[in-house]
Amino acid sequence: MDRARHLRNYDLHSWTGITLGLIVYVVALTGCFALFDNEIRTWEDPALRVSVPAVAEQAPMDEVFTTWMEETSGGAELEFLRFDYPSTYAPYYMGMMQFHDENDEHVFEEQRWDARTGAPISMRGDGLGIWLLDFHRDFMWPDGLGGRTVGRSLVGIVGIILMLAILSGIIAHTKIREEAYSMRLKRSQRLKWQDSHKVVGIWGLPFYVMIAFTGAFLGVVVIVSQLIAAIAFKGDLETLVDAVLGPGKTPTGEQVQMLTVDELRAFQHPESGEAPAMLIFANYGDAAAEIDVYYTPDTELTTFEVLAISGATGEPITDDPYREITPANRVTNSIAPLHYGTFGGIWLKLLYFVLGLSLAVITALGCMMWIERRKHGNEGTKSEGFYNRLGHLNTGVIMGLPVAAMAIFYLDKLYFGAEAGRLAATGWTYFAAWFAGLGYALVRRNDYATTRELLMASGALALFIPVLNGAVTGGWFISALASDHTVSAWVDVSMAVLGLSTIAVAYVLPQSRSDKVSRRAEAELAPAE
Amino acid sequence: MSPIILGILGVVLALIGFFTWKAPRLTSVILWALIASMLFSAALLLTLPLEFKSLALWMALAVPIIWVAFQFWCYWDKRGWRVTAGLITISILSGAVVFTTPPPV
């Protein structure tokens, strides 16, 4: 490759990294927590820390469900109706519906019921678990700025930029085999960062490619695919939806007796023998009613397997070409399990956690190197003070985020306001802790000490999470580990281990710059990239 | 179309033209690669001889790859102008295909 092309490619890698590097870092780090969404929600809500009763002990739900549906909708035509059976992470029955009210507004309602008694359970407000998952998925983008679709697209664009950074990074590293084993720990600080960036980047490459592609797909496809299809259909979205999903079945107007949710529980999957996990109804109560019965999949690389049946007779619907599972369906269905690591149990998720953390570290190192090169190398055009402030800002954003993530665990357990305000309080706490970290970095003016101290603070916060949980809920992890529901106890144990590891890492980090390499000497090493 | 909207459109087009002239690679990587990938994908969606439902899913999977490939090309080619011209040509040809091909029913 000629030098001009190499430099252009290197510029592309460098600029994609520095313009969106911090956002990639935020998405990567928040993604590490989003992996354990189900576990964290169980930790969050003590009502979920129960095991699922045997089917014979579960309450019959038909009357409860239909009464709730009729009373809540007031007889309005339902646009969406769903019923969930109890599961490990949601050990209760749950109903959801959407309808148009008399003011022509979309109304969404949900209710959960005790699995043993069928009694209504009050809904706990969204908070910690939803924040950690949705901040990763869509930055909790506010409705006033376009809503979650905009946020999700931005996260998708981060995936695109990460793909571009990976591609340009691979091309930039012409000696990839040598660099995979090159760690010059006794040289300058920047060389240590540079080697770590390369070594970790090369070894984790297959994971990073997969996570960037699946993330880009999950984020961008929501809006871009619709846009492309709309261009192809010249704005005729109705024809487009019909072409992809098939024309919706229109109600006949003839009322029929539907199969009940208790009868539907017996509809085992014909091949796997699994019991239904969830039902989605269309044209409820009409002769044209259809029920999509969702099962835990036989193959792991899909979220659910779906069987469509007639709502009145229970006969499988086999003559609908739009329900046929094609290879394209299988590939697209595998994207979410691949991205969230749901296909291989808890150990795979832990591996994802480590690799996700390494992606966050690579991105952070990339940003630090960019500043360092300009501060001590020959690439900078601004004053040293400018790069110092940029360094403080960078350190504050990077090191403030783990503190913020830990702080909302405390908010969750110490919150005393209305349940409706829980999510907002979580958000305010998150940003307050993050800004506090940023402020600390700007006041401390020593990026090495700031990194060490904020890492210590994050570790200490994580370490005391089990104590907080035990003191507030009475669910001490030692006794919970011996019970029949150990999920929240394992969250406590993981947090304690994470806290100790973080403190240990912080302990070995330097308090200040250990090398005094001159600007010129550093500059001479730069083209080795 | 109202004169105000026409005015705004004119200003936007003039700005795009100005930035394309001043920084062809940067404008291409940010804007032209996105426009070209969307129109090119739409044209493929209409012309490839596959069952539409499957093709729509395959194209959804291909969009991130096509987009990144066009972005990468912006900095790979020796001449910045050649990339911009190429992306604009792809956009125009794809747009023509989209305009002249009826959507599947």
Image (tube, coloured by chain):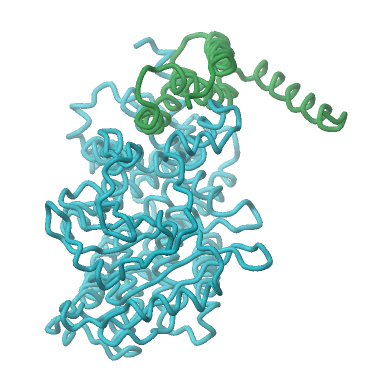
Chain colours: A cyan, B green
- Location of residue B56 (image quadrant): top left
- What residue sits 36% from the left and 62% below the top? A452
* Residue B99 appearing in the image: yes
Residue closest to the far right: B3
Q: Please tell me how many numbered marks the rendered image carries.
A: 0
Residue A487 image position (x, y, % from top left): 22, 74
Q: Residue at x 49, y 19 (%)?
A: B43
**Residue A410 or A151: which is nearer the viewer?**
A151
Rendered view: A49 above or below A192? below
Relative depth, front residue between A156 and A354? A156
**Which residue is drawn at the image coordinates 32% and 39% (left, top)?**
A332
On the picture, is A479 further left or further right than A82?
Answer: left
Q: Which of A301 and A378 is in front in this view?
A: A301
**Which quarter of the rendered picture does the C terminus of chain A lie within?**
top left
Indicate the position of residue A265 as horizontal and vertical percent values.
23, 68
Q: Position of residue B45 (x, y in %)?
A: 44, 23
- Relative to A458, residue B90 above or below: above
Q: In the image, residue B18 lies at what x, y percent?
A: 72, 20
Quarter placement of the N terminus of chain A: top left
Seen as rendered, the residue at the extreme front is: A254
The residue lying toward the viewer, choosing from A312 and A115, is A312
Q: In this view, does A461 lie above or below A305?
A: below
Location of residue A287 (image quadrant): bottom left
Q: Can residue A521 be seen in this view?
A: no
